Image (cartoon, rainbow, N blue to C red):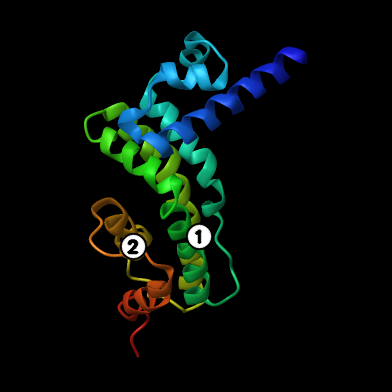
């Protein structure tokens, strides 16, 4: 029991140290040595749980972003999507966005990290969103002929595009309007 508690404390310390260092110094400034020193663990402890710096940073950011997976279901798809998208935007505008941008950048040249991003960040969120969209389709709020995955991409791609490229402000005050514009093409036609 004591070993399990010690392991969980060490795990938590490593994730917290990773997140703080990557948020402060950027992904390129993140090193396993710095994490080990900050967390008070040895490098072998880190490598026992995480095979690379990228997977460690991904786990740290996923740990912080966990709450964005839940989708409300009030019966109003626009309100529900607006609420959930604003949670994502709020997280991505802060330190989680800084760390996540670094992970995404590293994933472009690391196929294992790219697969881990798809499995741990994207897949669970796409699944939850698809479930909520399927209920909206069943309720007649959205067209049944548009694949759910395409709906997810149409709704969330602008957020990630803005986060990754800095093409425009990542602002929650535009979320509802953007969702309304998107849904005009997804709503059933009379």
- Pinpoint residue 114: horizontal percent, then vertical percent: 31, 34
Q: Give the structural element (helix, strand or loop) at label 2.
A: loop
Q: Is residue 130 visible?
A: no
The answer to whether 58 is drawn above or below residue 127 in the figure is above
Question: Cα distance, mark 2 to mark 1?
Answer: 24 Å
Residue located farthest toward the bottom when viewing the structure as drawn: 190
Tell me what residue is drawn at x 47 percent, y 64 percent. 86
Is 139 situated left or right of 55 in this image?
A: right
The answer to whether 38 is drawn above or below residue 21 in the figure is above
Residue located farthest toward the right when viewing the structure as drawn: 1
Q: Give the structural element (helix, strand or loop) at label 1.
A: helix
Is 94 situated left or right of 185 in this image?
A: right
Q: Which residue is mark 2?
A: 147
Q: Which residue is mark 1?
A: 87
The answer to whether 30 is drawn above or below residue 148 in the figure is above
Q: Is residue 62 visible?
A: yes
């Amino acid at each position: 029991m004591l070993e399990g508690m010690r392991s969980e404390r060490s795990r938590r310390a490593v994730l917290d140290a990773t997140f703080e260092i990557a948020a402060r110094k950027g992904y390129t400034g993140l090193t396993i040595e710095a994490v080990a020193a900050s967390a008070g663990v040895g490098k072998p402890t880190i490598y026992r749980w995480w095979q690379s710096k990228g997977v460690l940073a991904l786990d740290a950011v996923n740990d912080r972003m966990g709450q964005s997976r839940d989708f409300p279901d009030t019966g109003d798809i626009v309100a529900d999507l607006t609420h959930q998208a604003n949670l994502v935007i709020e997280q991505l505008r802060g330190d989680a966005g800084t760390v996540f941008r670094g992970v995404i950048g590293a994933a472009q040249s690391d196929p294992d990290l790219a697969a881990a991003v798809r499995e741990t960040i994207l897949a669970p969120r796409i699944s939850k969103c698809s479930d909520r969209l399927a209920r909206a389709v069943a309720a007649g709020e959205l067209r049944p002929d548009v694949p759910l995955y395409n709906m997810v991409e149409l709704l969330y791609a602008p957020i990630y595009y803005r986060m990754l490229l800095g093409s425009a402000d990542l602002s929650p005050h535009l979320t509802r309007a953007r969702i309304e514009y998107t849904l005009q093409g997804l709503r059933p036609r009379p």
